[in-house]
Image (tube, rainbow, N blue to C red):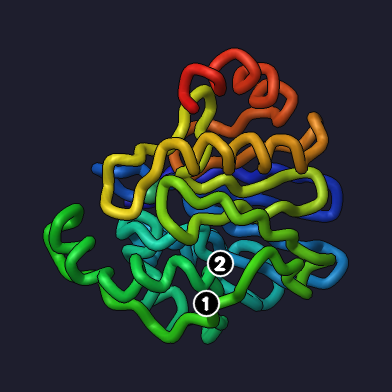
């Protein structure tokens, strides 16, 4: 069965959201930068075939696989996607503790171990030198090394922030106060017309998220 996909054109970019297999329906994103022809795949969850098909539909080379974090619903097909595309995998150094335990996490949440290929860990908040520059905002709280990726006009918020919701913090390494501080920092760092693509569920506008967080944030901190 082909997964549900939807493609958005945003400035110089095409963003295809691939809704991956149940039970998590995680959103994997394929982003293409039209001027350079480069593509990245963000959070390859369950169903390598559907993700690779979505990537192949857009011309150009996959230059990287980016991870907002290392939970198994976001990396279920990481090894296969990395092997087929040959693209390097990037994650924050503080997330290594989660990725090193992918077999245990996978066993607990998917009922099977999840293989992890070689990962290039970055520190702090770099701007990744690809596709016109991808700004990293570190947003620990859902996991220790969770990040958001900010492109020109849109961002990937992983399980840090959903449409009118925030990531759970009851897993090992979660911290609700830290998550609240991360969400504030992230929302303060993006213009209101930024489209926010999250790890599960629909996208929404940063202006709506900022307004929502102004009301909800103080209760969740
Ligand atoms: Zn997660
Ligand atoms: Zn998730």
| Neighbourhood count class around disc 2 (C-alpha, 10 Å): few under 14, some 14–19, many 20 upward | many
Q: x, y percentage for residue 146?
A: 50, 56
Q: Residue at x 76, y 67 (%)?
A: 127
Among numbered discs 2 and 1, the one appearing first in the sequence: 2
Q: Quadrant of residue 72?
A: bottom left
Spatial CA distance of label 2 from label 1 is 6 Å
Q: Is 7 situated above or below 101?
A: above
Name the side, left or right, on which 118 lies relative to 138: left
Going by the picture, which residue comes out furthest to the top?
215
Residue 77: x and y in percent read 35, 67
Asked if the residue under mark 1 is in contact with the one under mark 2, i.e. CB atoms within 8 Å, the reply is yes
What residue is rendered at 80% in x and 65% in y? 133
Out of 71 and 23, give the one closest to the viewer. 71
Residue 4 horizontal/vertical position (percent):
44, 43
Hey, which quadrant is residue 132 in on the image? bottom right
Q: Which mark is residue 66?
A: 2
**Residue 143 versus residue 155: which sits nearer the camera?**
143
- On whether ligand 2 comes within 8 Å of the CB at mark 2, the answer is no
State the image coordinates of residue 114 (x, y, percent, origin top left).
25, 70
Location of mark 1 (residue):
89
Q: Residue at x 57, y 38 (%)?
A: 181
Q: Is residue 25 left or right of residue 41?
A: left
């Amino acid at each position: 069965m082909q997964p549900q996909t939807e493609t958005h054109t945003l400035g110089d970019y095409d963003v295809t959201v691939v809704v991956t297999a149940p039970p998590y329906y995680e959103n994997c994103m394929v982003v293409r930068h039209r001027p350079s022809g480069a593509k990245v795949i963000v959070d390859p969850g369950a169903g390598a075939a559907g993700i690779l098909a979505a990537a192949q539909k857009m011309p150009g080379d996959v230059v990287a696989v980016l991870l907002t974090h290392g939970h198994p619903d976001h990396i279920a097909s990481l090894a296969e996607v990395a092997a087929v595309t040959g693209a390097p995998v990037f994650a924050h150094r503080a997330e290594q503790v989660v990725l090193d335990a992918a077999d245990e996490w996978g066993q607990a949440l998917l009922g099977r171990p999840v293989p992890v290929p070689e990962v290039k860990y970055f520190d702090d908040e770099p701007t990744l030198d690809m596709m016109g520059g991808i700004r990293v905002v570190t947003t620990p709280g859902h996991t220790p090394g969770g990040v958001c990726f900010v492109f020109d006009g849109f961002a990937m918020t992983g399980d840090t922030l959903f449409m009118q919701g925030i990531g759970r913090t009851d897993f090992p390494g979660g911290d609700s106060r830290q998550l609240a501080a991360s969400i504030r920092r992230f929302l303060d760092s993006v213009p209101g017309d930024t489209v926010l693509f999250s790890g599960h569920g629909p996208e929404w506008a940063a202006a709506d998220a900022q307004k929502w967080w102004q009301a909800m944030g103080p209760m969740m901190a």
